[in-house]
Amino acid sequence: MNNNFTRKRDLSKYFLPNINRARKRLEDAKTLKDNFEIPTNLIGYGINKKFHIKTFGCQSNVRDTETMMGILEMIGYKHTDDIKEADLVLLNTCAIRDHAEQKVFADIGVLDKIKKTNPNFIFGMCGCMAQEEAVVNRILKSNFNIDFIFGTHNIHRLLNILEQVLFEKNLVVEVWSKEGDIIENLPTTRNNNIKAFVNVMYGCDKFCTYCIVPFTRGKIRSRSKQDILDEINELIRKGYKEVTLIGQNVNSYGIDLKGENYVFSNLLEDVAKTNIERVRFTTSNPWNFTKEIVDIMKKYKNIMPHIHLPIQSGDELILKKMNRPMKIQDYLDLINYIKENIPYCSITTDLIVGFPNETREQFERTLDLYNKIQFDNAFTFIYSKRDGTIAANLPDSTSMSDKKEWLLELNELVKKYAKSQNQKFVGLTLDVLVEGPSKKDQSIMSGYSPQWKVVNFKGEANPGDIVKVKIITASRFTLNGEIVK
Ligand code: SAH
Ligand code: SF4
Ligand code: F3S
């Protein structure tokens, strides 16, 4: 190893993550509007330099990457898709399952090798894994020559952290395990000029027993209605056609805005009234998904008929152990209410198989529920133990080979209904927001239907157009058709 590149590890200088601290909900969140500044000795530092950010995980990370791109471009850096030509690489990581983490460790190994051949190359890790005590300890104990680690609450300090990296020999670690604030007015570079993610709330207080997110993202905090609407009106002025309101549990929006009596259905209505062409939202937790939300969706044509409503399991005891106590009948009633009120609404879900000590019988209740609802699609996962969560301490005698078999069995159902649900659209004409030529066949155009289905079609259209497409065939993955006038 070339010691020239080895950074000193001075624990006394670090803000390290602390999972117990992250669990606490003591301080009120503040909205901070002037919390970003460019350190004077970094002005212009990135001119003629390139950066690359590799993003893992959910929409929250995708949106954070846009903010970090905006921040780095403020000092002259240009983005590159090619890691090999980057002077600076950031891994914006996800901690949701072990598999996601292993991919990041593999990448750290690759970047470590690049650093050995190029002393000027710098790389860092941010995102949800940076908030995990065990992960940061593992990196500190390793020989990886990583330059910096910072947490999800420290994004606005990216340039201050970079300044320390450039002018000190120490590995820089700045992770605040805290409730979190709302930081407005950060620079941003959107990675799409037709569709945009808009944060409506941050964090999560639900503490589902398997989930790491409340620890990595802090407590629930809702942005002010005015800040959200201002952002959307600005996007409309710039020509955006679609916004997706994002948060870990968007239907909890507003419960922390004390005394305001302004909840997600109110926000959704106000966003629809901006008259942007398309409004979507994700993710919703079924426990407080109100009928008012469905009523507002029904009232406004620009709210797209797609609801992602993760149930996780079809067994009530498992749901209780997950701290998502819901009666399956209440979930079925909600789905029926949606289907009755919003024709052709697509409904998708997330499911976990192999929660600690799950039995075959309990798993079969998930299959039963799936057969009853016939979801348009689902993300399915094998339970992954996360340090610090309650479920991590539960005994688990269900074998991994059973869990793997169950996942395959469940995925067969997912495939079957994805196809049959898509076939319902054959013969219908749908409005398609055009993305561009299809990746597989450049002579065909591709876009999304209101139900969030990929539509491939023949005919002339430009990215950003909304065109009418008659659906002729449907597969599990796509609807296929041609433009009609
Ligand atoms: N806030 C969303 C979910 C965000 S995480 C909600 O409550 O619906 C996305 C999905 O990852 C979850 O819905 C769940 O299915 C899955 N997931 C979360 N933690 C997991 C774990 N420890 N093991 C396996 N899957 C997990
Ligand atoms: Fe995780 Fe539950 Fe919060 Fe979703 S609602 S982010 S699954 S704790
Ligand atoms: Fe992953 Fe963090 Fe999102 S754990 S799913 S990137 S909130």
Image: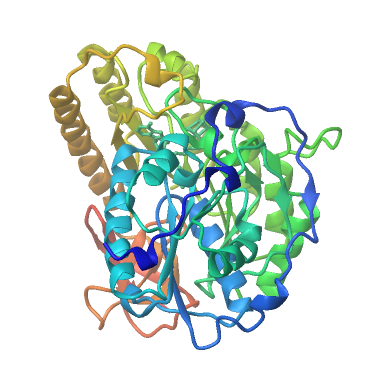
Front one among 215 and 331:
215
Give the image's coloring scheme: rainbow
Q: Position of residue 129 (x, y in %)?
A: 44, 44
Q: Quadrant of the C terminus?
A: bottom left
Count of picture labels: 0
Above or below residue 362? Residue 303 is below
Residue 301 visible in image: no
Above or below residue 388? Residue 159 is below
Front one among 398 and 115:
115
The image quarter in which residue 113 lies: bottom left
Q: In the displayed image of the protein, which residue is found farthest to the right?
A: 259
Q: Is residue 296 left or right of residue 230?
A: left
Q: Is residue 445 left or right of residue 174?
A: left
Above or below residue 57? Residue 215 is above
Q: Position of residue 147 (x, y in %)?
A: 45, 60
Q: Quadrant of the N terminus?
A: bottom left
The image quarter in which residue 278 lies: bottom right
Residue drawn at x 31%, y 29% is 383
Front one among 78 and 303:
78
Above or below residue 427? Residue 20 is above
Residue 291 visible in image: yes
Q: Position of residue 52 (x, y in %)?
A: 42, 71
Q: In the displayed image of the protein, which residue is found farthest to the bottom?
A: 48
Front one among 39 and 402:
39
Residue drawn at x 42%, y 47% is 94
Q: Is residue 364 left or right of residue 4?
A: left
Residue drawn at x 31%, y 60% is 427
Q: Position of residue 140 (x, y in %)?
A: 41, 45
